[in-house]
Amino acid sequence: MTTTFELPRTETPPEPKKTGSFTIIAWSGDLDKIWPTLILATTAAASGRPTSIFFTFWGLFALVRNDRGITGTSWMQKMLAFMNRGGIANVKLSKMHFAGMGKAMMMSLAKKYNVASPQELLELAQDAGVRLIPCQMTMDMMGLKREDLIAGIEEPVGAATVIALAEGDTTLFI
Amino acid sequence: MTTTFELPRTETPPEPKKTGSFTIIAWSGDLDKIWPTLILATTAAASGRPTSIFFTFWGLFALVRNDRGITGTSWMQKMLAFMNRGGIANVKLSKMHFAGMGKAMMMSLAKKYNVASPQELLELAQDAGVRLIPCQMTMDMMGLKREDLIAGIEEPVGAATVIALAEGDTTLFI
Amino acid sequence: MTTTFELPRTETPPEPKKTGSFTIIAWSGDLDKIWPTLILATTAAASGRPTSIFFTFWGLFALVRNDRGITGTSWMQKMLAFMNRGGIANVKLSKMHFAGMGKAMMMSLAKKYNVASPQELLELAQDAGVRLIPCQMTMDMMGLKREDLIAGIEEPVGAATVIALAEGDTTLFI
């Protein structure tokens, strides 16, 4: 990891009043949504809040290993995986992706202005103790198996666990 | 209703600490957003939390009756309804819809893995006492009348009611 | 400002139980997301809640001055600004925009049904004391300078401030 995620220069963060839990339901698999998800989660963890990300629907593909090709067992699952390749290094912009050119420009600007990449932020999140939790139902439907996903994440759970997590102080759907 | 919505097999949900209210602002009319909205809402209701969904903007079209054709009174409203057909059976995927093929694949996978369809979840939500609340402003703008919407929902309200609902424990914008 | 933002006619808003803070992370630059962001924020402020909007990623472009042309210093930033023109008067619908026709229809319907435009709501938000806060990191990456943005907004901040704001009662990601 060559770039460090740093607070912007002008910032003097206010003193947090309490350290309640911070939970994100990561539904989107778009690069420009995964990015704020990981920035918010690592910042919340850095300020001492117990932080969890629940990866569901398209968002779960960000937890697929980058070196995994087509996932799934049935032809429908394989076709979905073909059109929506998993791995945090492979996620695309929600708009202005332009066959990868928009993404390359955005990544280049991020590097220039010292903003960590999603890949780096994911590792940073794991180091900071952010709980990365895959959605069981999505794994079933998409035919994703435990060995398709990166190491260092928790056991898959379902909606009831998310509702319990959402009892915490802040819950965002991204 | 043939399929039952069940918790994933591996799940041992944590004991909820309290049973505060759970509110979703359902802005999106996409199938892949309506789905988690209804899964989260029915799960929250099942765990004893007072649950409400406020349907606004594109999301309100999910409450239109499936047998309703073109809605609206002015030609602009009719044109919007033509391009964005209402009814929970007619909602489309936000991506990879492919003229219905992507949706058909997703619905087929859901059935195979015992995940209830949005139509079934909507009925389940009503049975579980989830409050389904349409947005008055959207009804006005889109020219939707009370008889265009399904039975068993509440009277339309505006933003001030949503702000009051949002005083509860969890509020998500989906 | 010719149109007034009014509560829908049928509404009898419930009495709010408390007046906790209300925070929106405005990530999207789409007209149909900026609209509910500003409606919710002005309504929250009107009901006495301390309200803030943090404008980040595509959302920050809504704070660019309408008379600003291409922003940015590097060619990549200029190209991004060219394809995603800033200014609240220039934002587009997330779907059915149709080269501006869909937007024109929506704005026309809004006017007819007495719903304030995003431009009017932005001014209303400023009058009502809603804090409009730009994201420093986005300004850096997109090459936006303070003079590119409208008057009457706060100094740019980063994620740590947002996490502290999110300690409040309601936090939405839109």
Image (cartoon, coloured by chain):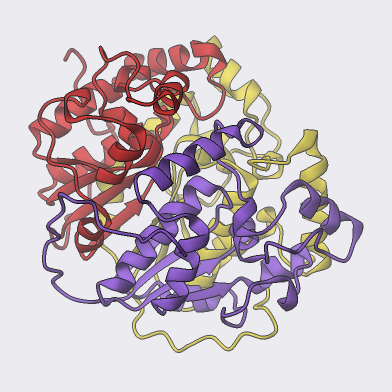
Chain colours: A red, B purple, C yellow
Q: Which quadrant is home to the N terminus of chain C? A: bottom right
- Give the residue drawn at x 60%, y 42%: C30
- Give the residue drawn at x 43%, y 77%: B127
Q: Is residue B126 above or below residue C83?
A: below
Question: Could you tell me residue A71's position as x and y percent?
Answer: 32, 21
- Give the residue drawn at x 17%, y 75%: B18
Q: How many marks?
A: 0
Question: Could you tell me residue C114's position as x and y percent?
Answer: 77, 69
| Camera-side residue of C141 and A77 | A77
Q: Does the image show residue C52?
A: no
Q: Does the image show residue B21?
A: yes
| Camera-side residue of B93 and B160 | B93
Locate residue C16 relative to residue B105 in the image: left or right: left
Question: Could you tell me residue C80's position as x and y percent?
Answer: 57, 21
- Give the residue drawn at x 79%, y 69%: C113
Locate residue B149 relative to residue B6 in the image: left or right: right
Locate residue B162 relative to residue B142 in the image: left or right: left
Q: Is residue C60 above or below residue C161?
A: above
Locate residue B74 relative to residue A173 in the image: left or right: right
| Camera-side residue of A116 and C72 | A116
